[in-house]
Amino acid sequence: MPLIVTGTIGIDTVYTPDHGHRENVLGGSCTYFAAAASFYCEPIRIVAAVGEDFPDELRKTMEQFKGVDHSGLEVRKGSKTFRWGGKYMENMDQRETLYTDLGVVAEEPPVVPEQFRDSKYVFLANTHPSVQLGLLEQLPQRKLAVADTMDLWIDTAKPELMQLCEKIDGLVLNFDEAEQLTGKRNPVTAARHILEMGPKFVVIKKGEHGCIIVHKDGISALPAFPTENVVDPTGAGDSFAGGMMGSLAREGDAGVDPTSFDAIHRAVAHGTIIASYNIESFSLDRLATLTSHDLDVRFDEFSRMTRIG
Amino acid sequence: MPLIVTGTIGIDTVYTPDHGHRENVLGGSCTYFAAAASFYCEPIRIVAAVGEDFPDELRKTMEQFKGVDHSGLEVRKGSKTFRWGGKYMENMDQRETLYTDLGVVAEEPPVVPEQFRDSKYVFLANTHPSVQLGLLEQLPQRKLAVADTMDLWIDTAKPELMQLCEKIDGLVLNFDEAEQLTGKRNPVTAARHILEMGPKFVVIKKGEHGCIIVHKDGISALPAFPTENVVDPTGAGDSFAGGMMGSLAREGDAGVDPTSFDAIHRAVAHGTIIASYNIESFSLDRLATLTSHDLDVRFDEFSRMTRIG
């Protein structure tokens, strides 16, 4: 059954300390999410907008991921595509934003097309929580809804974020953001507080340090896949979410409860693996050549290296 | 067969943001290590020195851990016991040293007593690498030698640390220290560089983010045990090392190669679990009431929460 993602499609320029830079490559949360999810289930439906300036070449890059339905991609006349420029610091865990040209992202949000309104699995990539709420309301047949958020909305739109929390099954956010949202420094305590706001589960992302899952039925933690091959971390969180939601949709279609602790734990492992591939190149380059076999090999390796009992 | 540890026994004063403070409690690397290791194997032999001022009460605290042989504990007339005062910051991952009174630690290092020279499993807790080398030479029958180190020695005694690396099987150090020692930001790359200096394996500790093992035969990563109950992180690294070495000694005695990747991976999981208990109280309070059953319960829980395949 269909997995839908709402978010951005952007044109990125990225500087790295060790691997040079790339200008005007495909980026955006929707893009990374959909490419990653396409390895696990189909169709993946995209709800996003770009401007008239969106290059054909980047569109072709998107279209190479089979199973992604681009019919919801809105091209706005007279508008500009979202653009982001960033520079990674020496430790690759911190980055500086060089510029953000919001373009269409500052305009009215896209509408969920009629043909997408029966979507069952929903991922609301990071944007203003009011926009996320508005999109969610257009998806009445959802079985699973998960949202991402960021520090900006915790600062400026906390009431709306709290409203969103009442309506979603899961929230994905960074370690620092969980602390910011709850005032709790311990990640497990912070996540428990978020569960009280509504979601059944919270995934706290810690980048190279892995993640913690806090679910009403249990807690688990996984490391990141230890790798030396880190070229560009852009899209790590979105490809992680794509792998996670793709796995949940696949399990949901196979009759498993996609909100169950076990399904989410497995899904997070899949997210971890596809994110570890994503960061091996700029933009979607690595995902474009990735195979299911590659994913299986690394999943098995990850499974062996975290197994202790 | 005996496990020997060389290091400090100290008197600590610790301030925490949420749980008040404690004055003049038992601390030191040897102390935490031995208490933790005593749950896995025996005897644990201690090589350390204290001053005339070492209180009977703290000696009794040490002696409650069965299987720890204190006959190597040197009490120096006219000398003072090592004292450390520290204050944990809000995030509990950073601390400020309030004072360090080196006392006996600034004097001649203790000598390995004759009756301890046949020790098979050796842990050299953090001190000047020349001292570690000197102690190691007094243990010619060792089957496994592992050392800890710190930023101070990487800064001030790198040649001696490199010499030590040629003679040990394993090195345990913090994430930042591995970068400092090798100039490599990626933990796996840094650890590989350390392997080239001599050890068969490196354990990179990341505190609340778990650890990474890089061994000549493989790589693995484990999260920390996710817990809300963090009172005082003092001794986390030493109790981790104690659990790890205790597990390796136990497996070594059972015929397993204690330098093998699999044995070290399991040992690190045991270290993770006992460290997670240690931080639930000040000083050795939690370890003093801990049972093997408690360890088994949490090990099983940790095993379940990290199992993905």
Image (cartoon, coloured by chain):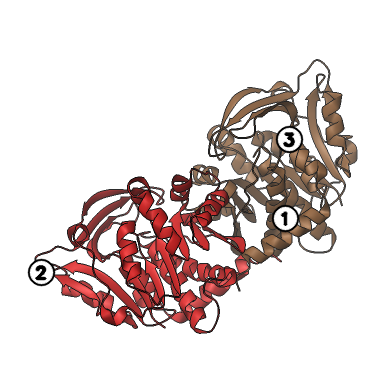
Chain colours: A red, B brown
Seen from the viewer's position, the closer of residues B209 and B198 is B209
Seen from the viewer's position, the closer of residues B283 and A299 is B283
Question: Residue at label 2?
Answer: A77
Seen from the viewer's position, the closer of residues A136 and A10 is A136
Closer to the observer: label 1 or label 2?
Answer: 2
- Picture quarter with the N terminus of chain A: bottom left
Q: CA distance from mark 1 to mark 2?
A: 61 Å
Residue A199 image offset from top left, x and y in percent = 49, 61
Same chain, labels 1 and 3? yes
Q: Residues within 10 Å of mark 3 (few under 14, many from 20)?
A: many
Residue B295 image offset from top left, x and y in percent = 77, 54
Question: Residue at label 3?
Answer: B283
Image position of B44 with respect to A167: above or below: above
Closer to the observer: label 3 or label 2?
Answer: 2
Image position of A82 with respect to B153: above or below: below
Residue B270: which disc? 1
Query: Residue at the location (37% across, 60% down)?
Result: A231
Write down the chain letter for disc 2.
Answer: A
Q: Residues within 10 Å of mark 2 (few under 14, many from 20)?
A: few
Residue B276 image offset from top left, x and y in percent = 68, 48
Q: Amino acid type of disc 3?
A: Ser
Q: Residues within 10 Å of mark 1 (few under 14, many from 20)?
A: many
Residue B18 image offset from top left, x and y in percent = 60, 35
Query: Residue at the location (59% across, 53% down)?
Result: B211
Query: Is residue B6 visible in this depiction of the protein?
Result: no
Q: Secondary structure at mark 3?
A: loop
Write down the chain letter for disc 1.
Answer: B
Closer to the observer: label 1 or label 3?
Answer: 3
Q: CA distance from mark 1 to mark 3?
A: 20 Å
Q: Amino acid type of disc 2?
A: Lys
Q: Amino acid type of disc 1?
A: His
